[in-house]
Amino acid sequence: MSYIVVDGISKTFKVSKRSSGMKAALKSFFKRNYVYVDAVKDISFSIEKGEIVGYIGPNGAGKSTTIKMLSGILLPTAGNIKVNGFNPFKDRKKYVSNIGVVFGQRSQLAWDIPAEDTFDLLRDIYKLDDKKYQKNKEELVKLLNIEEIIKKPVRTLSLGERMRCEICASLLHEPKILFLDEPTIGLDAVSKKIVRDFILKINKEKKVTVILTTHDMMDIDTLAKRIILIGKGKILYDGSLKKLKTEYGSYKNIIVKTDDTIKEIKLKGIISKKKIDGGYNLIIDSNLVTVSKVVNYLSKYHITDLDIDNEQIDDIILKLYEDYKI
């Protein structure tokens, strides 16, 4: 049986609804109108131990709701979840000792005291042996490069420094599963690299299973071999990132620098041709036409420079969104 099994879960929220204005406000005070919103609708997937899975989708797709159900914060309206034999909601007390959760826009660190003091509090909450706790803390602090940072009040830290402390706090009790909800949101390039390298290291060395939700597609490209795409509360794609790149990453961008006028290119596989400053921008489908064939075709023009780029992961994901109309 798989390590994480999600079987037909749904989550419906009851939301009050009213028009704007004083009259509508007074009316709703006596009688409220409600609508039911399906945040997640009948989704199923399984994840093996030691996998890093990118759980992606646009805003409002149901990503955070799924993570909250997987971590036991929310009870599904329907369906079942089993994680390492536990029901996250019903077995919550036993279950939480096996998981770590980081919400990029929520903090578990006390604002006015150093992060190290929160770490000590978590030691007591999880009833950790002091020797084991000190060993884990020293190792995590060194890997995340926060030796001096944890001694400062959290309110004085930058976002990148705080997020590294959040990740450290979530792993002090050696969880087997790590849920990361937008862990690199707003981080600078240096902090993002530290976080990504750290996640890869604990996954490789300690076989920590990671479920990652993010809008930063470089996180997905760097960390995940498999992605699950959710849209409008449903799973639309579940497969390897490599397969996705093969299916959707065939487009290449060719920047041609020339003073000549390039007329219509009569080659199958030319997706678009756009005039830009100093030349043209061509997008080709390499499944239909090779780069060498395009370059050979362009040799009749006076080309001063040529630049060829593969599509970025962002572009590939956008195409996926377009195909599924989300």
Image (tube, grey):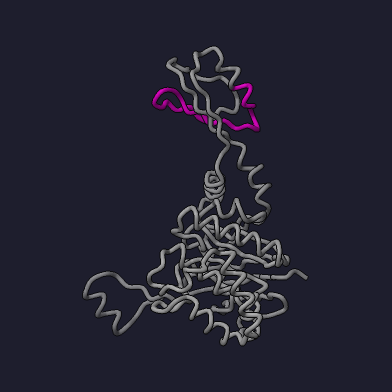
Choose top left, top right, bottom left or bottom right for residue 198: bottom right
Depicted 111 relative to depicted 322: above or below: below
Q: Which residues are magenta?
A: 272-294
On the picture, is 148 further left or further right than 287? Answer: left
Q: Residue at x 48, y 18 (%)?
A: 304
Residue 291 visible to an observer of this rendering: yes
For image coordinates 67% across by 73% down, the residue present is 176
Which residue is depicted at the point 70% across and 67% down? 206
- Residues 227 and 81: in front is 227
Q: Is residue 131 above or below residue 38?
A: below
Frontmost residue, 6 versus 127: 127
Residue found at x 51% / y 13%? 301
Q: Residue 275 placed where, x, y %?
A: 42, 25
Percent position of residue 310, x then y: 58, 36
Foreground residue, 26 or 251? 251
Q: Residue furthest left?
A: 22
Magenta stretch holds residue 286: yes
> Where residue 24 appears, x then y in whole percent?
26, 75
> How many marks on residues?
0
300 relative to 203 in the view: left or right: left
- Residue 90, visible in the rendered structure: no
Residue 317 % position (x, y): 55, 48
Direction right: furthest residue: 1
On-image quarter of the N terminus:
bottom right
Magenta segment: does it hold 292? yes
